[in-house]
Amino acid sequence: MSVTAKPIRFSAKPLRLLSGAITAAAFAMTVIGCLNVVAPASAAGPEPAISSEDAIAHFDDLIAKYSARDDLESRERLASVHFGRASRLASAGRPIEALNDYNEVIVSLSTATELSLRKKVATALWGRGALLGEMGRSTEEIATYDDAIARFGTETDPYLRSMIARAKLGKGKALERFGRNDGSIAIYDDIIAHYDEIDNPFSTPIAPDAFLTKGALFERLGRTDDAFAVYDEVVARYGAIDDLFRREAVADALINKGLMLVRLDRAEEAIPLYDDVVARFGTADDASLRAKALTAVSNMSAAYAYLGRNKEAFFILSRLITYYDTDTEPELFEPLAQALLKKAALIDKAGRGDLAIATYDEVISRYGTIADPLLQQSVAQALAHKSATLETLGRRDEAFAVYDDIVARYGTATERFARGAVALALYNKGVGLGKLGRGEDAIASYDNVIARFGTETDLPLREQVAKALVNKALILDTLGRSNDAIAADDEVIARYGETTEPALREAVAQALGNKATTLAEAGRKDDALAVFDDVIRRFGEATEPALREQVATALFNKGVSLAMLGRNDKAFGIFDDIIARYGQSAEPSLREVVAKAEAAKKVVQER
């Protein structure tokens, strides 16, 4: 029997952090979106510009000092020191201890009647809730916000009202994580109705944040018209108000609506919205507003590119970069970096890889040493794009050097983007090494991914680990280490076999298919047949194209294995099943399997 088939391999092409093509999702066009509420630690007094451990020791000394005093000023100061200590502990990765500081303020001042001390309790409750949210303890987070609302919800003091508004906003966002969207929307509406206080200096960002958060929620729920209505209301309500937070909200609403329109294939309608942002804020005195205008122009360029008008897109970006290049305000650095990334991708798309690399290098050289996380994310994107372009140009050794640079820069970082960049770089390096026939080195790179991120719960990192395991198994198989290959496939199945995430289900299907083929090639055809059946059982009703392809391949390989065992009638029936299932499919990969099944059927008939 001469008909054979290998399982479809996991994509072995380098992946970019951002798509090389400018489409609706290209470059993950930045949704400026919701304003971030100030971190809980903002309530703290000034922190020493020293290491976290030294700072914590310093706060310990201050706590000992003020704990021995009972006057009002010392009690106020002690609470502020606890906030400072909590901030340092949280940033040092010690959140449980940070919670203890917030709890100490809440408990010790719970019966205080002085307004200044009640403000400290409100701040501690909000800080505790925010930290619990960061820790993923959303049920306790909501309970803490409810405690704050119960204690201070009827207060008229401006600061306490701002803390309640912040607690309500935090509760609304936490409810979203539980899918309790109606409750979230009700809370956002309550904030908009009762806490939109321009004359309260403590709460000015909160109602605009509630508006934008509500709009983003509607968008995620697919309630497009409701999202548009929210963004339109922001512009109508705040468009003529000379308050920085509200002017920023107007810019964000226009930008977010524009992004939605592009995603809905209505890019022409997005362009006037971006123009409106530029007209309102392009020459604003405040740097944050100029940054919004820069982002709007950058997104306008992406919209033109989405429409296939690449020359206009490139011209707009070039003018934008020239215009803002001499602006030294740090707030403009990140949107300018994103504009440079988009310009580089347009150049890359035009086939000018060397010039694209030079532009990526410009991002890296300008911003590579600035500690701001958003800028570092842009630098990571530039490095990832640069490595992919080098791969395309066949300059693989240079690409490897960039992968190593990413790991060196971000290997110990804790930010999500940094960990994702490292996982992607190690995976892509493994792919490149495999293409060069350096199997053992490729395995080492995949093992690095698995060792670093194998216990992660973040979905993108889990996907990288799954892909690394699948590719590792394939290379082990090519090296003749079939038992090790099967063990790697089994690890994929054990880790992700019960998952519902599409990408991980695809990895499981591929691991099963690869395992079955390895077993068949090792002469263990009955074992292989059982695993092919497992693929069909698990994924036979799936509608995703990748899984349909895996099922078709498993069926075909099962038929081949049956024919090789001399069980021609059953093999014949399997090939007929493939033709019946997929004969009318439009996907090229499925049509290819059908063609192979038809050829195999003829071979079986002629035997």
Image (cartoon, helix red, strand yellow):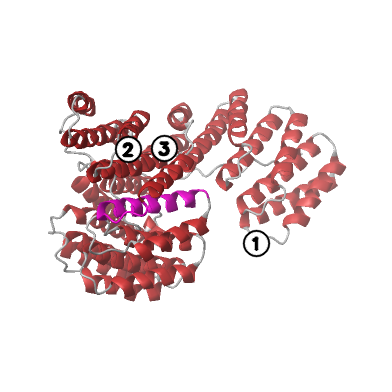
Q: How far apart are the alpha carbons under marks 2 and 1? A: 71 Å
Mark 2 vs mark 3: give the one in front.
Answer: 2
Q: Earlier in the sequence, mark 2 or mark 1?
A: 2
**Residue drawn at 27 percent across, 65 percent down:** 246
The answer to whether any part of residue 466 appears in the image is yes
Mark 2 vs mark 1: give the one in front.
Answer: 2
Is the residue under label 3 in contact with that under label 1 (CB below 8 Å)? no
Mark 1 element type: loop
Task: Give amino acid for label 3.
Answer: Met
Span shown in magenta: 153-178
Mark 2 element type: loop
Residue 336's spot in the image, x, y percent?
23, 57
- In the picture of the structure, the residue carrying the numbered disc 3 is 135
**Residue drawn at 28 percent across, 42 percent down:** 113
Task: Give amino acid for label 1.
Answer: Ala
Closer to the camera, 145 or 416? Answer: 145
The answer to which image quadrant residue 214 occupies is: bottom left
Say if 287 sits above or below 395 in the image. below
Q: How far apart are the alpha carbons under marks 2 and 3? A: 28 Å
Q: Earlier in the sequence, mark 2 or mark 3?
A: 2
- In the picture of the structure, the residue carrying the numbered disc 1 is 586
